[in-house]
Amino acid sequence: MSFDASELRSLAADLGTVPKIAGQLAKVAVKKTAKDIEATAKTLSPVDTGNLRSSVKASDLRGVSQDSPSAEVRASANYATYVELGTSRMAAQPFMGPAADKHMPAFEQAMAQLAAKAIGG
């Protein structure tokens, strides 16, 4: 009985590239989703003076690592939480949560596709 290990070596080499490919693709997906959430949150935010809308920003994405890509989208206006969640005297006017909810299915689909692409080539 003989055994040819050449295909195993090829498979091992291919699997070695998976983290790099997956990391690059995940970084792109995270950046796009963060920007999409930012844009949607701005359109959904209630406008009185425009301060709340202009305070919605995605974190600086230039430093996003391929090893663990992440981004933060936040409204920095000091009253943003009160608008989002409401108070005892004011009804909630959510804009951040619905923006994230809108883009999560597309993000999850993109991550599933990149996993399939990284593994399948």
Image: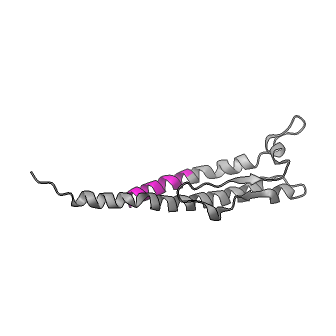
The image quadrant of residue 28 is bottom right
Image spot of residue 97 (x, y percent)? 71, 46
Q: For this view, does 98 lie left or right of residue 68?
A: right
* Residue 5 placement, left or right of 117: left
Q: Which is nearer the eye, 102 or 82? A: 82
Q: Residue at x 59, y 57 (%)?
A: 30
* Quadrant of the image occupied by residue 16: bottom left
Residue at 60 percent of width and 60 percent of height? 64
| Left or right: where 18 falls relative to 90 | left
- As drawn, 96 above or below 15: above
Image quadrant for the C terminus? bottom left
* 24 on left or right of 56: left
Instruction: Identify the residue at image location x=57%, y=59%.
Output: 65
Total numbered labels: 0
- Residue 5 image offset from top left, x and y in percent: 21, 57
Magenta stretch holds residue 3:
no
State the extent of the magenta-drawn residues as a range: 108-121
Residue closest to the eye, 102 or 111: 111
Instruction: Work out which residue is located at the far bottom of the displayed protein and give it.
Output: 62
Which residue is farthest left?
Answer: 1
Instruction: Between residue 72 and residue 32, name the one nearer to us.
Output: 72
Q: Residue at x 84, y 43 (%)?
A: 82
Given the current orientation, which residue lies at the most extreme top position?
A: 88
Q: Is residue 120 magenta?
A: yes
Q: Position of residue 105 (x, y in %)?
A: 58, 50
Scheme of colours in the image? one colour
Q: Main secondary structure of the magenta part?
A: helix
- Which residue is at the front of the view, 95 or 6? 6
